[in-house]
Amino acid sequence: MSAKYGQKRIFEYIILSKIIGGVLFLVLLTFFKSTFAYHLILYFFKMYTTLWCFILYSILWSYTYNYFDILDGKRLFALFSGGSAIGAIAAGFAINFLTKFTSVTNLLLAWSLLAV
């Protein structure tokens, strides 16, 4: 697929679909607030964000693999993996801290806008 469309265009489509999905979940969470469906939507949102973590992680490593040669990769990929793990830990603490001050829907809006 990347040979036909190019990696840049595929990456743009993926980011666009992430933004559209995030805004769609924001609308759904705002519309169904204080109902049983709200918790069901949050459950699907958790699956949605987990799926995006896998997709974006795969894209990152695909670009990284194409950018570096084998010697640089052996030297730098461990460093990148460590930085990724530290970033995931920091993001978990940040989300835990931010949910005390704002709602999940506002964090969803920020998550969608950060892709732009």
Image (spheres, helix red, strand yellow):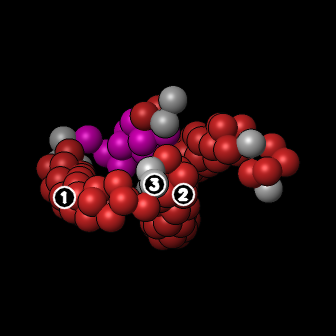
Quarter of the rendering containing residue 70: bottom left
Q: Earlier in the sequence, mark 2 or mark 3?
A: 2
In space, the residues marked 2 and 3 are separated at their CA atoms by 13 Å
Local crowd at mark 3 within 10 Å, few (<14), some, or many (≥20)? Answer: few
From the image, give the main secondary structure of the stretch colored magenta.
Answer: helix
In this view, which residue lies farthest toward the right? 4
User: Is mark 2 in CB contact (under 8 Å) with mark 3?
Assistant: no
At label 2, which amino acid type do we have? Ser
The part of the image, by quadrant, that contains residue 20 is top right
Locate residue 66, reporting x and y percent.
Answer: 54, 52
Q: Position of residue 67 (x, y in %)?
A: 49, 47
Is label 1 or label 2 in front? 2
Note whether residue 81 is visible: no
Q: From what the image shows, is residue 104 above or below residue 42?
A: above
The local crowd at label 1, few if under 14, some if 14 to 19, many if 20 or more residues have their Cα within 10 Å, is few
Q: Which residue is mark 1?
A: 86
Q: Disc 3 designates what residue?
A: 69
Disc assigned to residue 111: none
Picture coordinates of residue 57, whole percent (x, y): 46, 60
For the residue marked with disc 3, what is the amino acid?
Asp
Kindly identify which residue carries mark 2.
62
Start and end of the magenta stretch?
102-112
Tell which of 22 and 60 is nearer to you: 60
**Identity of the residue drawn at 45% across and 54% down:** 69
First-in-chain label (1 vs 2): 2
Q: Give the CA separation, mark 1 to mark 3.
A: 25 Å
Spatial separation of the CA atoms under disc 1 and disc 2: 20 Å
